[in-house]
Image: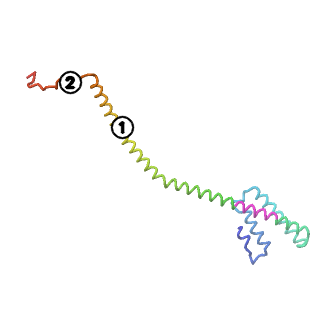
């Protein structure tokens, strides 16, 4: 609608065309419930009705008609400015949402890699824990072996196997 406002319509005079577009803009669904715009829309409607009546009754050169035209132009300019700011706000929000969407897409793309990495790290932890347990067990065996040897227990003679069984039956 803002673009249409800048275009010229050859079938209508410029003031009527501007009036139609600004009324469409003021009643645009996304902005319709904005309190400031509602006030301007109602004020504009009343001023336009007054203008039409004065114009019809007194003509275009009447000072009241000229004053109403200036008031209407001022309100229309406020509506245009409001719509432009609203559009810029929406553009800014769209960019923020696009950036957030890209961040979430990247996180989603990284998720399988993160899960795979987590599984690999858990597997490595299990291997390291098993190795630790084995090494710790061997270390305890060696400590016990050292403890036995260090108590002064020395084997005098190697053990001999008996030649025959002691209890034959």
Q: What SS does tag 1 mark? A: helix
Q: Are marks 2 and 1 in contact (CB under 8 Å)?
A: no
Q: Quadrant of residue 139?
A: top left
In percent of width and height, residue 158 lies at: 16, 26
Q: Is residue 57 above or below residue 161?
A: below
Q: What SS does tag 2 mark? A: loop
Q: What residue is shown at x 11% (from left), y 25% (from top)?
A: 162
Give yes or no for residue 136 being in the magenta stretch.
Answer: no
Range drawn in magenta: 74-86
Give yes or no for residue 83 being in the magenta stretch.
Answer: yes
Looking at the image, is mark 2 or mark 1 nearer the viewer?
2
Q: What residue is shown at x 22% (from left), y 23% (from top)?
A: 154
Q: Residue 112 — which label? A: none
Prevalent SS, magenta region: helix
Residue, disc 2: 155
Give the spatial CA distance, label 2 vs label 1.
Answer: 33 Å
Q: What residue is shown at x 85% (from left), y 69% (from top)?
A: 52
The one of 66 and 41 positioned closer to us in this rendering: 66
The one of 138 and 99 positioned closer to us in this rendering: 138
Residue, disc 1: 132
């Amino acid at each position: 609608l803002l673009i249409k406002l800048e275009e010229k319509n050859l079938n209508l005079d410029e003031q009527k065309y501007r009036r139609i577009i600004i009324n469409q803009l003021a009643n645009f669904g996304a902005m319709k419930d904005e309190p400031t715009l509602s006030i301007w829309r109602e004020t504009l409607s009343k001023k336009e009705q007054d203008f039409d009546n004065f114009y019809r009754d007194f003509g275009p050169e009447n000072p009241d008609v000229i004053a109403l035209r200036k008031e209407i132009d001022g309100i229309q300019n406020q509506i245009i400015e409001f719509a432009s700011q609203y559009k810029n706000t929406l553009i800014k929000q769209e960019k923020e949402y696009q950036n957030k969407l890209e961040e979430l897409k990247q996180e989603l793309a990284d998720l399988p890699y993160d899960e795979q990495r987590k599984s690999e790290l858990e597997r490595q932890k299990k291997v390291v824990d098993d190795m630790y347990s084995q090494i710790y067990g061997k270390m305890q065996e060696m400590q016990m072996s050292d403890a036995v040897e260090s108590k002064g227990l020395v084997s005098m003679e190697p053990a001999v196997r008996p030649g025959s069984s002691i209890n034959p039956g």
